[in-house]
Amino acid sequence: MESPPDSGGRLIIVCGLPGSGKTTHAKHLEAKLPAVRFCPDEWMDALSLDLWDEARRQRIENLQWEFAQQLLAHRETVIIEWGTWGRSERDALRLRARELGAAVELHYISASVDVLLDRIQRRCLENPPISREQLLDWADVFQAPSPDETALFDHAVMVEIPTMGNPSKVRPT
């Protein structure tokens, strides 16, 4: 683990695939802490933008990150729930937050493709709906945080969303 910063600022990165419960988890943290939470889907919806428009999503995430850095520099707690599918994206966020003197946490939410699909179908947010094939493709691309990666954070948590009938597992990594 890198040395913890002296600042009161904190960045919490919530990562996982669609339907894993990132927003629910991040909203819980936001209310508990308090914190400022950044979710591109909510901004896109508020602006009546197509959730599938990747160019606009990237611009919104860039704008959110600019604002998040200002908050971190002012010792605030920020929650990023972009999915952050790749380690390089998580590394860039972690390293920049550290430059700003903030502590950095990683919260990884994991679930099977069957559970993800069930949750996505029940929430009915996407149009067109996310398919099982898309989830399988995304699961292949997603880089789950390794123990080596999680050791770089001040605090790391893994939340496993259960299959039907099994309790959730939350464990520090």
Image (cartoon, rainbow, N blue to C red):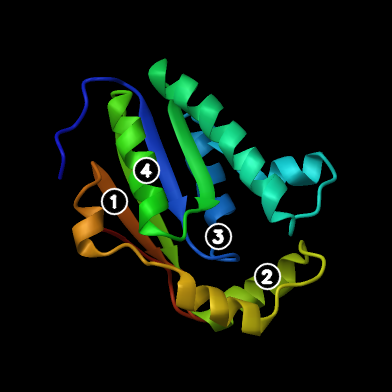
Residue 151: x and y in percent read: 19, 52
The secondary structure type at the circle numbered 1 is strand
Residue designated by label 3 = 21
Residue designated by label 4 = 92
The answer to whether the residue labelled 1 contacts the one labelled 3, judged by CB atoms less than 8 Å apart, is: no
Q: Nearer the viewer, mark 4 or mark 1?
A: 4
* Amino acid found under the numbered disc labelled 4: Ala
Residue 88: x and y in percent read: 37, 53
* Amino acid found under the numbered disc labelled 3: Gly
Residue designated by label 1 = 156
- Real-space CA distance between mark 2 and mark 3, rounded to the nearest whole angstrom: 10 Å
Is 135 drawn above or below residue 2 in the view shown? below
Residue 105: x and y in percent read: 33, 43
The secondary structure type at the circle numbered 4 is helix
* Amino acid found under the numbered disc labelled 1: Ala
Numbered badge on residue 120: 2
- Real-space CA distance between mark 4 and mark 1, rounded to the nearest whole angstrom: 16 Å
Farthest-out residue, top: 74
* Amino acid found under the numbered disc labelled 2: Ile
The residue at 56%/79% (across/down) is 137
Residue 70: x and y in percent read: 48, 20
The answer to whether 76 appears left or right of 123 in the picture is: left
Is 26 drawn above or below residue 133 in the view shown? above
